[in-house]
Image (spheres, rainbow, N blue to C red):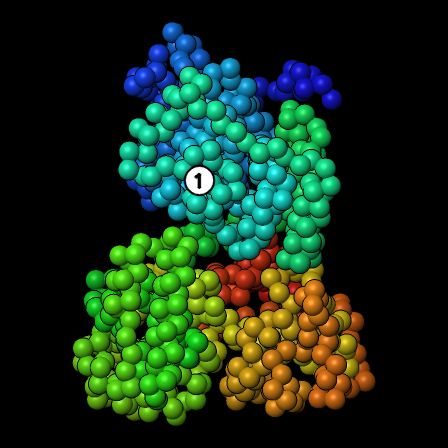
Amino acid sequence: MDPEQLKRGRVNAMQALKEFPNEVVTQAHVKFVNVPGLDGQAALITLDNGHDHKKPSSFGPGGLKSLNDALDKVFAHSPKVKFIAVTGKPFIFLVGADITGMPLIKTREEAHAIARLGHDVFARLKDSDIPTFAFINGAVMGGGLELALHCHYRTLSSATPALALPECFIGLAPTWGGTQLLPNLIGADKAVKVIIENALNQNKMMRAADAHKLGISDVLLEPADFIEESLAWAAKVAQGEIVVDRPEIDRGEAWDAALAKGKAIADMKLHGAAPAPYLALDLMAKAKTVPFEEGTALEDEALATLLTSPELKASLYSFDLVQKRAKRPVGVPDKSLARPVNKVGIVGAGLMASQLAWLFVRRLEVPVVITDLDAERVDKGVAYVNGEIDKQLAKGRISPDKASRFRGLISGSVDKSIFADADFVIEAVFEELELKKRIFAELEGIVSAECLLATNTSSLSVTDMAADLRHPERVVGFHFFNPVAILPLLEVVRAKQTDDATVATAFAVCKALKKNGVLVADAPAFVVNRLLTRFLGEIFACVDEGTDIEVADHAVDSLGLPMTPFMLLQLVGPAVARHVAGTLHQAFPDRYKVSANLDRLVEAGKSSVYVWDAQGKPSVDPDIPSIMEFGTNPSTPEQIRDRALAAVADEARRMLDEGVVAAREDIDLCMILGAGWPFHLGGITPYLDHSGVAKKVTGRTFAE
């Protein structure tokens, strides 16, 4: 199709779209500046929504129109400017489209109009006969990065904490030029990493150095005097004193191989359950051969499809939970009740305890002391933390001074009296109630009356754990998820005796650790483990009854879960899974069983039902037939899926009726943040509602 024909055929999206209601409009402020050594002026456009950095700038129709007006002003300026640069307010370049306005787009025509508007405005930077620059001074995501890609050149502050094209994570694709521009700038393989792999890996962000290494920016500059240094660099480029060389892009078989890799990643993560990454890959395939105008017209069609899809609606619900409810947890006492935490103690020096120690050192920057039964274990725990510090230093993520400070904060001892002046002590030892009770009784004789005592138990009763203490009111559950550094959820468990000051302190610590806390009642296995154990229990039961392991494991692939049930079992560990199942069986024997085959797997010392070949492909461990016993009543994949979802619907309803959490949104949030429940399914309770499972199983929807 003729690019000029596409241009002539576009409707005037500028007139077709109005500002979103309540849109916080990002204004484009123009300043004409003199740059030393530049024969003439430059135009500097600053994007600013008028809020501090806590409200990042984004683009709705109003913001796009403001940028368009700014460009009108710049192109009309006389004399003609020597170059045009776009930058952001302090700490923020632009984080993309205004996601809060997306639910307002009801028709395909409206979706098409916002797609075209973005393309029309951004294309003015790409098509300009005046050199254009993006001065990326802070966080840049989605449409913000696409805007920068339309510029002829890009400078990047080394302090920029987050760069990404996260669209596929929330049911969209980077369709304001991202699928066309990025692979043609850095190559298809690197573009697949940014657009597909990072997005589907729990929305992984790039740091400045990583993005620059990929070739997204032309120069990496220090944050001090970033704008001045960028202006000086741009002036030299505009005057021909600096020539930017970019690598030649391989548009042969390597391009196709990269897209095949991207599809394999999408299949592994989603099993075809959401359309966005596959549409993105189709568009990237077009970018190999079609003219830019034709490629962006195809992006218009893709965005119109995705903006009106049920997957996006579901993703927006998930996104709202993570962005709002997670940051304002329900039921938490006033933060003024929180006590300061200036020293942390950790009982235990195993892997989980060591991970916790590193997290507390890194985030709280207070002294952290590990204790265990002997010096060898303590030394191993301290060595783990020092190893993590070394890794951060080697990657350039912390300075040598910061590394030295961190090393000075971590220490170990075999004597718990070292906790005498601690404000917060958490135990992370084996899941045995009597052991944990003994530890707390010993600690109570050492620590101050104000010291908070926390347990990282995954399923045991915090109330029972504290029952014999003189001050049970200062005991709280602090359930982290493994791996600690990655999973953001922290279930904060309020026991029957826990007082407001303890809960407030726990949430203050949670926030300092940069975790998302959800307040839960002291019920068996709390939220995530209770639901996952019921879910896995039904699938394991189908195997016990005679279903092939691989059939059962892939029966729920259509949900697009981050890993299969038996892969999750390996991550958790069969022994831990058995323990949690045992705890829940004691509490709810009618619904939770401990599989004899799970017992056999643990007793055989197996960490998985699978083994892997040299290429990393799994197959059922050949020892399994001699370890496990199977019935003669196999189920079909559909029967397994229906059975597992019905069990989850039943259990979620019971949890709400019991008051384990304040509302269904908290169950959804816990499953998204702690179990990786996919964004595109929109939370577990809405999914059970619109799939009809909730009504069928419980007689009502969760929304009622």
Rendered-image quadrant of the C terminus: bottom right
Residue 365 in picture, x, y percent from top left: 27, 63
Residue located 44% across and 67% down the image: 484
Residue located 66% across and 49% down the image: 262
In the displayed structure image, the side of residue 200 where residue 61 appears, left or right: left
Which amino acid, by three-letter code, is at mark 1?
A: Val
Would residue 108 be visible to someone looking at this image?
no
Tag 1 residue: 140
- Per the image, label 1 sits on a secondary structure element best described as strand
Residue 702 in picture, x, y percent from top left: 55, 63
Rendered-image quadrant of the N terminus: top right
Q: Nearer the viewer, residue 253 or 183?
A: 253
Query: Which corner quadrant of the image does residue 602 belong to?
Result: bottom right
Name the residue at the right extreme. 632
Residue 224 in picture, x, y percent from top left: 28, 37
Task: Give the crowd class for mark 1: few <14, some 14-19, many >=20 residues within 10 Å.
Answer: many
Q: Is residue 562 shown above or below 165?
A: below
Q: How many marks?
A: 1
In the displayed structure image, the side of residue 432 where residue 308 appears, left or right: right
Would residue 10 be visible to someone looking at this image?
yes
Q: Is residue 433 shown above or below 249?
A: below
Query: Which corner quadrant of the image does residue 421 belong to?
Result: bottom left
Residue located 71% across and 88% down the image: 627
Residue located 63% across and 44% down the image: 189
Q: Is residue 12 shown above or below 566?
A: above
In the displayed structure image, the side of residue 74 where residue 2 appears, left or right: right
Query: Which corner quadrant of the image does residue 553 belong to?
Result: bottom right
Residue 285 in picture, x, y percent from top left: 70, 38
Q: Nearer the viewer, residue 529 or 220?
A: 220
